[in-house]
Image: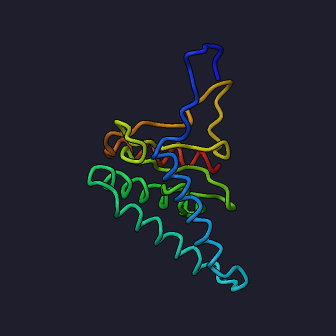
Amino acid sequence: MSGTESSTYQGFTAEERAAMRDHVQEQRTAARRDPRAGKAAEKAAAAERDVLAKIAEMRDSDRTMAERVHAVITASAPVLAPKLWYGMPAYALDGKIVCFFQSAEKFKARYATLGFSDQAKLDQGSMWAAGFALTEVTTEVEKQIAALVKQAVS
């Protein structure tokens, strides 16, 4: 909180509360998938189906970008496992989120975001980008995403 008396904590926005509810549901779904079954391929396939279903629910512009981002990430870094994270398509390495796609609609933003966690190896000196605004996914943008994702898991 800043030092000004006029700023007051307003609590979480409706979108933030919805994201937290999504996260709780994702954890419950993951817990229901029997960890003792030892069928990692089946669990991975189910997690990817969850991601694709979430993408399918998005508005047209977000859905088109998310589909292309998903295709680029899974092709460029097959070591990343798709999974839902706070209701967003995300991609994890050894269970830890490396990158994610946030639709513009999710938090009523004017653009979608491709974000990277601290697990991503994008370090460049003392400061580097950890999120990228997306308004369109062109062939050139796909190349940039592929390069970033490959670097992130290198």
| Percent position of residue 35, x then y | 70, 79
**Number of marks drawn:** 0
| Percent position of residue 67, x then y | 36, 58
| Percent position of residue 153, x then y | 63, 51
Q: Up-down: is 151 above or below 76?
A: above
The image quarter in which residue 7 lies: top right
| Percent position of residue 125, x then y | 67, 26
Q: Residue at x 54, y 41 (%)?
A: 12
Q: Up-down: is 46 above or below 121?
A: below
Residue most extreme to the left? 60
Of residues 108 and 83, the one nearer the viewer is 108
Of residues 125 and 118, the one nearer the viewer is 118
142 with respect to 30 (left or right): left
Residue most extreme to the top? 4
101 with respect to 120 (left or right): left
Residue most extreme to the bottom? 37
Q: Up-down: is 3 above or below 95?
A: above
Q: Quadrant of the N terminus?
A: top right
Q: Residue at x 39, y 42 (%)?
A: 112
56 with respect to 87 (left or right): left
Colour scheme of the picture: rainbow
Q: Residue at x 34, y 51 (%)?
A: 65
